[in-house]
Amino acid sequence: MVKDTKACAKDLPEAALVPSEHLRFMNRFTVTRADMCISCGLCASLCPYGVHKRVEGHVRILPPDDRRCIGPSCEVNYFFCVANCPTNSLSVGPSETFASLGDPRWTSEMILATWAMSETGRPLPLDHPGNVGASGGGFDKLHFKLPELKGKVDPSQICTAIDLNRRDSGAKIRIPIPIYGGGMSFGSVSAYTMLARAKAAKRWDTFTCTGEGGYPELLIPYKDHVITQIATGLFGVREESIQRTRIIEFKYAQGAKPGLGGHLLHDKNTPEVARMREAVPYTSLFSPFPFHSVYSVEDHKKHLDWAHAINPKALMSVKVSTPNDVEMVAVGSYYAGAHIVHLDGGYGGTGAAPEIAKKNIAMPIEYAIPKVHKFLAKEGIREQVTLLASGGLRTALDVAKAIALGADGAVIGTADLVALSCVRCGNCESGRGCPRGIATTDPVLEKLTDADWGAERISNLYGAWRLQWCELLARLGMTDISELRGRTDLLVHGNSQPKEASK
Amino acid sequence: MKYERYHIPLKSVPSRIAPVPKFVIIRADNCINCGKCEKSCIYGVHKRSEVDLRKMADPVNNLCKNCFRCIQDCPQRAITMMVGPDYKALGRGLWTSLRIFTVWNEAETGKIPVFGAGYRGLFAGPGYDGMWTDMSEIVRPTRDGIHGREYISTSVDLGSRPAWLEFDKAGQLVTDMPPITELQVPFVIDTTRLRAVTNAMKTGMARAAKHVDSLFFAAPESLPEEAASELNGQFVPVYPEGADVRKIVLPRGARMAALTLGSTWREDAKRFKSMYPQTVLAFRVNAGKDVEKRIVELVKSKVDVAHVLFDEEGMELDSGEPRYAKDSLRAIHKALVAKSVRDQITIIAGGGIAAAEHVPKTLICGADVVTLEKAAVLALECRDCITCSIGSCPANLGDAPADWIENRLTNLMGAWRDQLLEVLGAMGLREVRRLRGELGRAIFFEDVERESFSDIEGGAGNG
């Protein structure tokens, strides 16, 4: 195992500002100017942020640009427009538009924080509200006991790399950040979205995954960074796409719809998607659950052996969801020959799933990780398995918490899409698909996402996350992210981040 | 005999009132009518005015799906969005605006709600929100999916089942067979606790119950003649506490009758059994402290069905420290199992059933059947106002015709049954009877918090 931290922090991509002016539409506060305004222009001369603007030669002042407003807390300043207005025609309050973005799991703060990091590549402070959701449980109630930072963080001295193959045999694959991209099929997302993710994966020397909808040719140049998924529907699974890849992922179940198989509703099954999946266009495609050839752990091993025979060099990943007996499933997967056990928790992303499945079937990932981690350790095989977690890991801190609970790394899906400007409106499933051009196969809408632009944004996000992990590790006095694994003693369960470390 | 596979036919039943928009779009005065929003919006919220093409028409709010494209693209920054005030004001407690909205849509389309993006709500919650159903990675109920050729049964029996059958030497059955009635779905409609019910509502709901082969509970004389004559076995008369059992005349063909538990219940049960030995006898019991003991007593008196009542929030009614139905039902189920009499009584649970997922969860906790009460009225676009009056109903329920009501409820039950199939499919079960009391196939919040977080400071079971 490479233990040289300098080597594993070498040649990482640099952050670069990605122009994203069109995404700066969200205002946290609303500045209202009433009709009695006399357009005197006092506010324009006072406001240092540029909310108010009066153009020379115009009779009336321009409508306020409330994106720049810092909100009612501005009242302590001498230049507070509301207090200074001679006609009392200004008021400042929270923005309704801002309140209609996001949900308890992906709060509006979190979406905007992810956008900011994708745009600039600069990390946000670890106590930024965008790092934690408001769902009132799980990761949102787990916090690190963080000592104050002593000195400066030197990211080049901190290793965030993980090994994907911890068995004695087979190819050694090491990725410089503890995450790779989860499966999103062609059909559920556009080819450009897949391409953007693949480009970012290549830049970071990590992986993305095809999902169950086949292997679009667009991705072949990135084949060393694309995992081929074999899912229950076997849509578009071909010998050559299995032979092309360095990691084969068997998808047994998906966290958002465990035990139900994939859904692609008829509208999104365009002729191109249907060709890739060898299906009839505009029919709804439901992949069965689970593999029809797998009724037992022995069958499961046979399955992996079959893929191994087609591509002996590839690592095997097994993606399962989180039932009560998830630890037995994990052990079974190890003995069947899996290198990576990938747990997908119930609150994970999806392109289309019955609402009843998302909340109610199978447990959230936060519970499954310690369960499996401890059981694998008890069985004496913890060090031979790479345990990856996914399903509701939204931020760098969520990933770190998952690692502290016992995972080796994580698989990221929705955060990639949010970097591509997803607002999580949840309309990916039908009609023309995503109105923002991410999870769509509509020939007009898919052009809204530019693959290069998207790749840079995802790459920036990964970079910002890495720097957040570096700060976290430095404050915990660690130099390697693998030291963090299973350190539940560093976590505290409660409603907010503890102010001082209790050490 | 021709085999007909059970199936609930569904068709779209349009709403009768103006929709409640989830999001409201406001176009400010500085709009220059450039029409960019019309191009951005793929849902048709923004359109030019038909009267004056130079101007934009008012946004069609109920089509908005919260994608922010128009706001993002507006060169004047003239568009703002807010969560619809009417939507926000809907519901309270367990009956959230989202749940009410979901029931409306299920009743309108008959379809399972399917959306993109992952779960968006709170991590867990009280009562049924604090549990998850299990799934199986390998076992499956049928070879070709839940809507495939093989059938997943949702039928349940109401009544007491003998533990064994006895035959004489000639092979003749000597066991006294208690009455049992079979339903095709594990839910029934109960109107006895509704705040306002019109005759059309009763007729429509009764027909819907017949349509899906379920049961309809109402006060004995309250059902309109017309509906009563159609119903035969599906109508369950519910007698109030203190009703004189000697004077009870059951409607023709009644398969089941419900009495309300009072001080004389033992005599009432005996008398009823002697008068109508072939009718399933149910007792309505308010859930509360020691309800499990009460139910064990019911079994001893040979009562076939216990209808356990909870309040709208799914909590016990008669108790200083009310438990959630989840805990109360588990206690009942375990008490019956401990006495080895679980199959001698059927448990119907009513109250706090606000969404499709509550059906399998209630069954897992130990009930055999659940009742639709408030959910049945919500299917008719009820807004669950705090003060309810048919005269000033915003959904105009006073005028709702019986056939519209029948179809809306049929849709709701169809959508809920299909969602039950999804859960059964994920668990690898082929019949809903197997779900009852399957506590090992559920994940409870308290348990997993303790198992997974007990070694974390501040976690459950750790200080």
Image (cartoon, coloured by chain):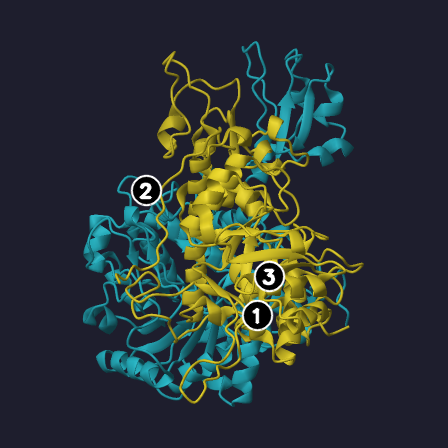
Chain colours: A cyan, B yellow
Q: Which is closer to the viewer, label 3 or label 2? A: 3
Element at label 3:
helix
Query: Measured from the top left, where is residue B372 in percent x and y?
Result: 55, 51
Instruction: Give the chain letter at badge 2.
Output: A
Q: Which residue is mark 2?
A: A432
- Residue A289 lies in quadrant: bottom left
Q: Nearer the viewer, residue B282 or A464?
A: B282
Q: Which is closer to the viewer, label 1 or label 3? A: 3
Which amino acid does the dot numbered 3 rest on?
Met
Q: Is residue A220 visible?
A: yes
Element at label 1:
strand
Q: Which residue is mark 3?
A: B275
Alpha carbon separation for disc pair 2 and 1: 37 Å
Q: Nearer the viewer, residue A267 or B203?
A: B203
Q: Check the image and report above or below for A251 versus B250.
A: below
Write the residue at 38% across / 13% down: B54
Q: Is residue B191 left or right of residue A331?
A: right
Sequence-earlier tag: 1 or 3: 3
